[in-house]
């Protein structure tokens, strides 16, 4: 019996996969426009489908809609949390119906790549829906004095623009 077990052991080892299933699944992607503060961000949501080793991280790279270097976000993955929400730094020049590339890498505690996700985010709105300046300032959301002269709303709010 021991000889049979020893003979079948190499066959069992050969059946093992080098890598397991992907640990994260993309569940949502969109642009968030904050009208009061006059900025936009990417918002990506992920669901954990497999456990990840303690100390794992996620690195997201977002295409910069205004051109230039991509925007990068590094986040630690927590073993007990099943959902991961990634919000980019503020972006400008978002154009309606234009696909913007996002790459998400899941890395183990040793820096080894566990998974790569690639997707595009498309906005149904253009940045021109945002005001040119934040409408409120400070922690109490006070009216921005640069926009509300003498406390009165302007007849027309300037909207955000982007150089072509």
Image (tube, grey):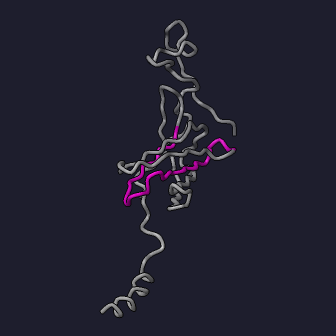
Residue 51, by quadrant, is bottom left
Q: Residue furthest front?
A: 2
Q: Residue at x 64, y 47 (%)?
A: 70
Q: Which residues are magenta?
A: 41-68
Query: Could you tell whether 4 is left or right of 127 in the image?
Result: left
Q: Quadrant of the C terminus?
A: top right
Name the residue rendered at 47%, 51% in the picture: 55
Q: Position of residue 79 (x, y in %)?
A: 39, 51
Residue 106 visible to the viewer: no
On the image, the x and y values in percent for residue 98 come to 57, 50
For image coordinates 51% across by 43% down, the residue present is 42
Residue 56 versus residue 132: which sits nearer the camera? 56
Vertical arrangement, residue 9 with respect to residue 47, above or below: below
Say whether residue 62 is magenta: yes
* 35 in the magenta segment: no
Residue 7 picture location, percent across and down: 39, 92
Residue at the (54%, 50%) spot, across then down: 59
Asked if 105 appears above or below 158 in the picture, the reply is below
């Amino acid at each position: 019996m021991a000889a049979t077990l020893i003979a079948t052991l190499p066959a069992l080892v050969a059946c093992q996969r080098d890598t397991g299933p992907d640990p994260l699944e993309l569940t949502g992607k969109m642009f968030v426009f904050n009208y009061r503060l006059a900025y936009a961000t990417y918002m990506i949501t992920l669901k954990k489908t497999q456990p990840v080793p303690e100390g794992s991280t996620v690195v997201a790279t977002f295409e910069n809609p205004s051109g230039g270097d991509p925007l990068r976000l590094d986040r630690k993955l927590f073993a007990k949390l099943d959902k991961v929400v990634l919000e980019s730094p503020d972006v400008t020049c978002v154009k309606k119906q234009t696909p913007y590339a996002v790459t998400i890498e899941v890395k183990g505690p040793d820096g080894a790549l566990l998974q790569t996700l690639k997707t595009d985010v498309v906005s149904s709105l253009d940045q021109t829906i945002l005001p040119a300046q934040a409408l409120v300032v400070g922690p109490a959301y006070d009216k921005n004095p640069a926009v509300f002269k003498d406390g009165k709303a302007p007849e027309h709010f300037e909207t955000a623009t982007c150089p072509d």
